[in-house]
Structures are given as C-alpha cells and as structure tokens.
Image (spheres, helix red, strand yellow):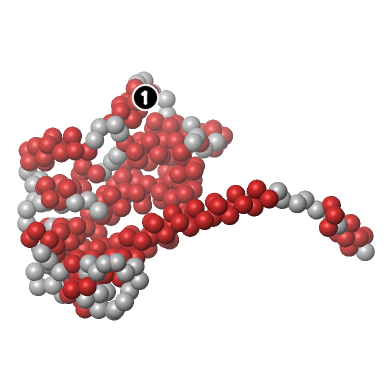
Amino acid sequence: MATTLQKSTSIKPPSQRTIRPFWVTVGEAILWILLISIALIEIAPISWMLSTSLRDPKNSFDLPPDFLPTALHWQNYAAVINSPDIEFLRFFWNSLKIALLVTGAQIITCSMAGYAFGRLRFKGRDFLFGLFLASLMVPGTVTLIPSFILIRELNLMDTHWALILPGITSAFGVFLLRQHFKSLPQELIDAAKIDGAGYFRIYWQILLPLTGPALSALGIFTFLGAWNNFVGPLLFLRSWENYTFPIAIATLRGYMGSGNQSEVLAGIMISIFPILVVFLLAQRWIVEGAAITGMKG
C-alpha cells in the first residue's frame, strides 16, 4: 500500500510537468530532416548501382536515373559468375585469401606493438612511437616505387606475398591499439605481476581479451583496405590466375569502357555485398572501438 502511494505521489500533475520550449522541438525536427537527407544522399549511388545491375544493358544510362529497380535481369549476375573470360571464383578466392591473411597479421603485430608502446617502458620508446606517427603523414603513392624495387629484389613479383608482406602491420593499427592499451586500468597489470605473470602472459591472457572492440575495428578497417586494393595487384601481379577481384571488375569494363555496364555494376555489387554484411554485423564494434581508442591516452 505504501509503495503504491509513493508511486502515485511521484507523478506530477499536468500543471507541474516540464514543457519543452518550442525552439527545442523545432531544432530536433530540423536535425532529423538533415540526417535523413544526408542518409538519402549517401544511399543514392548504391541504390542506382543495384537497380542498374538488374536492368537491361541498353537502359543503363537512362535519364533521369532510376534509383529503384524497374526490372529483374538476374542474368547479369549469372553472366559475371559464369563469364568464360574471367574466372570469377578464382579471383574472389584470391582477394579473400589476401584480405584474411593481412587482417590476421595486422591484428597480431599491431596488438603486440601497441602493448609495447602503451604499457612497457624502454629507452627510446617515445621517439620510436613518434616515427610511427610520422609515417602516417607519408602518402601511399610516395612509397610505391621503393616498394616495387624491394619486392622485385626479393623475387616476390607475381606472387600474393607481394601484397601480403607490405600489409602485415600498419602505423594506424599500432596507434589505435596503443591508445586502447593505455586506457586499461593499471591495477590489472599490478595484480598479474604479483601473481608472477611475465610481460607476454600479461599481454596474452590479461590485456588482449579486453581489447575486443579495438581489435574488431582494426580488423574491419584492414579487411576493407585489403579487399578493395586495386593499385597493389595492378603493380605487382602479372599472371591471370593470381589477379584479385578488383582487377576482374576493371576487366569487365572492357577497352575504353566498352563492356556491358549492367554486368560491370553487377560485379561491383557482388564485391561490396560481403563488405556490407560485415559492416552491418559489426558496426557496433566499429563505433565502440573508435570511441574507446580515439580520445584516451
């Protein structure tokens, strides 16, 4: 009875309820309209690609453009998969293998380096970390010629190792995980040291299981970069059986863009579908990892 009376007295009468100012409601409405408009602008190119990939090739560039499917020509996708000129499954597997190996390597190397820079004390630590950060300011195109010469001298041309080895670590990944390791409480490390744990055991059994969001964010960013890499395969690969999926899409375009545009867009939709699935399933970890590591340390 007392609980019911307490609940009833906690309810304010209509005259005492807080009334939101008019400009607050209008501001929220404007913000929602702005966000929805931005979302529509962002999704419009993907919607056009999807609808055009399902359209007859002669209607690929109709004006005004149709952002919703007006036909369902699934044979465009079948033509890409069963193309006699392009081994779709081989190219798809090549890209997937390279992306998975690069992602796994970066998770291992960047987490170990991030732990060392974030939690270990050694001479020259801050100077070395500064060099890592300085490398982020170097454009990737500047390193193309030195990378080509190095790969050629190592006799790795026309092999997938030419794409895997340069991507086994990254300054961005080291920075991301270093910030996360610095945000973890020192009490965990002190307790582990009291129990007799060494540096590697603290890293492997204590701290690494707590870096799930940061590792997920790094893994997704790395996978996207390796999957969409076009310049690397074009520069280092020569054999048709070693090419990756971005090269296959470029081949579909034909000479001077004379290929079937509906099939080209069908190939692009096939290439981005796994990425969209991964992003939709893991977007929570991306946001959480960026929030945890971006502002601390």
Query: Which of 27/84 is in front?
Result: 27
**70 lies left or right of 26:** left
Residue at the (50%, 35%) spot, across then down: 296
Instruction: Name the quadrant of the N terminus.
Output: bottom right
Badge 1 is on which residue?
125
Per the image, label 1 sits on a secondary structure element best described as: helix
Where is residue 256? Give x, y as percent. Answer: 9, 58
State whether residue 37 is above or below residue 85: above
Question: What residue is rendered at 12% in x and 61% in y?
Answer: 257
Position in image of residue 219 (x %, y %): 36, 50
The one of 181 and 56 positioned closer to us in this rendering: 56
Q: Residues within 10 Å of mark 1 (few under 14, many from 20)?
A: few
**x and y percentages locating residue 6 in the rendered image:** 89, 57
User: Type of residue at label 1?
Assistant: Arg
Q: Position of residue 7 (x, y in %)?
A: 86, 59
Tell me the residue at 44%/31% (across/down).
119
Instruction: Say above or below: 211 vs 276.
Output: above
- 92 and 34: which one is in front? 34
Picture quadrant of residue 94 = bottom left
In the figure, is residue 21 to the left or right of 159?
Answer: right
